[in-house]
């Protein structure tokens, strides 16, 4: 059976000379409002793209492992992961090793559509 495509849809709307952005989780899912394009720019930064690419290609076993692969500070990577998780781009899978639990990041989407309505 083929994997179901998971897509995020971002719609940017011109309302009276300012852009408002709306992120739709999967098609027909819950909507998230952005405060203008500032949050969208923060969400779609080059560092977040590099982070998602590393998750996709290297499949790290933890956030700490991801930070080491990226050669970035753990705290910064953790904050980026939390933001991407909040908007549904990344899922965190809990895994136990002995008495310890770690969170493994995986991509929750495989495509993104950005629409601009003027």
Image (tube, rainbow, N blue to C red):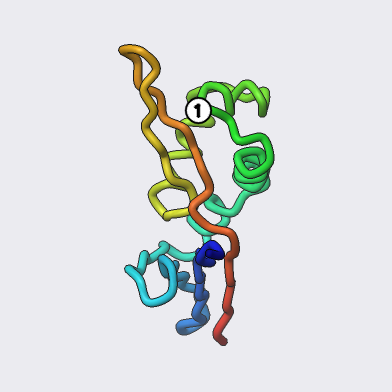
| Residue at the extreme front | 1
Task: Tell me: 112 left or right of 27.
Answer: right
Residue at horizontal 37 percent and vertical 66 percent from the top: 33
Percent of width and height locating residue 83: 44, 45
Query: Which quarter of the figure is the C terminus placed in?
Result: bottom right
Percent of width and height locating residue 7: 52, 67
**Residue 97 lies in quadrant:** top left
Task: Tell me: 34 left or right of 47.
Answer: left
66 vs 29: above or below: above
Percent of width and height locating residue 13: 49, 79
Residue at horizontal 53 percent and vertical 66 percent from the top: 5
Percent of width and height locating residue 29: 35, 71
How many marks the image carries: the answer is: 1
Residue at horizontal 44 percent and vertical 67 percent from the top: 23
Residue at horizontal 56 percent and vertical 65 percent from the top: 2
103 vs 45: above or below: above
| Residue at the extreme top | 99
**Mark 1 residue element:** helix
The residue closer to the viewer here, 83 or 98, is 98
User: Badge 1 is on which residue?
Assistant: 63
Instruction: Categorize mark 1 by other alpha carbons within 10 Å: few (<14), some (14-19), many (20+).
Output: many
| Residue at the extreme bottom | 118
**Residue 110 lies in quadrant:** bottom right
61 vs 11: above or below: above
The residue closer to the viewer here, 116 or 64, is 64
């Amino acid at each position: 059976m083929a994997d179901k495509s998971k897509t995020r849809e971002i719609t940017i709307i011109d309302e009276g000379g300012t852009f408002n952005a709306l992120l739709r989780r999967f098609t027909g899912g819950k909507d998230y409002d952005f405060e203008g394009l500032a949050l969208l720019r923060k969400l779609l930064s080059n560092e977040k793209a590099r982070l998602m690419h590393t998750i996709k290609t290297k499949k790290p076993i933890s956030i700490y492992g991801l930070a080491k692969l990226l050669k970035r500070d753990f705290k910064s990577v953790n904050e980026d992961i939390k933001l991407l998780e909040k908007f549904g781009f990344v899922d965190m899978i809990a895994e136990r090793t002995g008495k310890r639990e770690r969170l493994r990041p995986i991509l929750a989407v495989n495509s993104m559509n950005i629409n601009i309505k003027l």
